[in-house]
Amino acid sequence: MNNYIQIIVFNLLTFYMVQGQSINCEVVKDTFIYIEFDVRSSSSYPLIMRGISKSIDINTLSKKNVESFINDFYKKTFYVPEITLGNYKRILLECMGKNEGNVYLKKNLNIELTIVDKISVNSLKDKIELETGETIYLEITKIKGTFWTISKYNNELTTNSSELDIKNNVNIEKCYVSFEIECYIKPKKENVRYQ
């Protein structure tokens, strides 16, 4: 009977410890090409989404229509959520734990805005014209740093009104969330292939 109680107590403690730890927050330290695309059309609201990849040839992306462009883009990149929506803080608290995460946030006020601003300042601007008439504006930056990878089904991850629902895109599985970016490099215009 005593062993039975010890097993139950051990299992309960293990369960509560696992619940308090981060779930699916693998850490990746690497250099990526960060791309934000903004689809503009006279007949619809802007569609703005992001992705990262080790390398990408912009000229090989589908230009047939918006849907084929997005599907092709996410075959070649990992989805990056909009971090200024509160996603960043919720994911940070999940991945670091509430205590450590809150300490980090107090030391690094508005870190998500700093990341977004530095990416924008160091971005190469480019555009793609689709066969259906839409223009896709690109902001491309080479970034080096630490990222968390999470599932697109993570409860802390939300999309905004200018994005498509990522859960419906079969090409998106892993999401990369920028944690600490240490280097932002503006690619050269003459490079068709960004790497």
Image (spheres, helix red, strand yellow):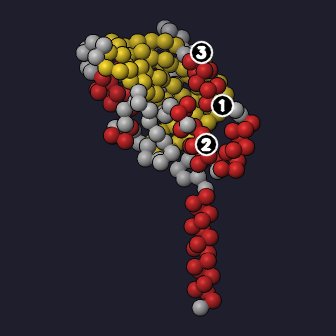
What residue lies at 62% left-to-right and 46% top-to-bottom? Answer: 93
Mark 1–mark 3 Cα distance, whole angstroms, equals 15 Å
Camera sees residue 76: no
Q: Element at badge 1?
A: helix
How far apart in space, not on screen, are marks 3 and 2 (Cα)? 24 Å
Residue 121 shows which numbered tag? 3
Q: Nearer the viewer, residue 86 or 96?
A: 86
x and y percentages locating residue 100 in the rendered image? 70, 48
* Residue 71 rendering spot, x and y as whole percentages: 33, 30
Task: From the top left corner, tell me how far across and down residue 92 is, in percent.
Answer: 61, 42
Looking at numbered disc 3 in the image, what kind of residue is underneath it? Val
The number of discs equals: 3
Residue 173 in view in this figure: yes
Earlier-in-chain disc, 1 versus 3:
1
The structure residue drawn at horizontal position 47% and vertical position 48%, both measured from the top left corner, is 155
Label 3: element kind: helix
Q: Vertically, is 43 above or below 99?
A: above
Q: Earlier in the sequence, mark 3 or mark 2?
A: 2
